[in-house]
Image: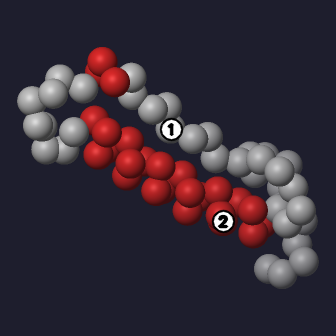
Amino acid sequence: MEGAVAPSTDRPPTPPQRPDDEDCCGQGCVPCIFDLYDEAMGRYREELAAWKERHPGESP
C-alpha cells in the first residue's frame, strides 16, 4: 500500500547483541557463536531495510 501511514506499533528492529570474545570456546564449533551472530546481523540488516522503506525519512 503505497502512501499508507505505518502504524505506530511498527518499531524498528533491534540489532542482535554481539557475543563477547570470551564467549567463544575456541574449539572450532560449527556453527560458532560468531557465525550465528553474523547470520542474525544479516537478518537484522534486511529487517532494518524493510523498516526504513516503511518509514522514509525516519531514523531508527
Q: Quadrant of residue 48?
A: bottom right
Of residues 58 and 22, which is closer to you in this image? 22
Point out residue 36 in the picture as x, y percentages from the top left corner: 32, 44
Give the amino acid type for the residue marked by disc 2 in the picture.
Ala
Q: Secondary structure at mark 1?
A: loop
Give the amino acid type for the residue marked by disc 1 in the picture.
Pro
* Residue in the picture at 19% in, 44% down: 31
Number of marks: 2
Q: Which residue is mark 1?
A: 16
Q: Secondary structure at mark 2?
A: helix
Residue at the left extreme?
A: 27
Of residues 9 and 21, which is closer to you in this image? 21
State the CA–CA distance, disc 1 to disc 2.
17 Å
Residue at the bottom extreme?
A: 2
Q: Quadrant of the N terminus?
A: bottom right
Q: Residues within 10 Å of mark 2 (few under 14, many from 20)?
A: few
* Residue in the picture at 84% in, 81% down: 2
* Residue in the picture at 17% in, 23% down: 25
Point out residue 21 in the picture as x, y percentages from the top left corner: 34, 24
Residue at the top extreme?
A: 22
Q: Which mark is residue 8?
A: none
Point out residue 30 in the picture as x, y percentages from the top left corner: 13, 44
Q: Which residue is mark 2?
A: 50
Relative to residue 15, is residue 33 drawn left or right?
A: left
Relative to residue 4, is residue 54 drawn left or right?
A: left
Relative to residue 16, is residue 27 drawn left or right?
A: left
Q: Residues within 10 Å of mark 1 (few under 14, many from 20)?
A: some
Q: Nearer the N terminus, badge 1 or badge 2?
A: 1
Relative to residue 24, is residue 16 drawn left or right?
A: right
* Structure colour scheme: secondary structure
* Residue in the picture at 77% in, 47% down: 60
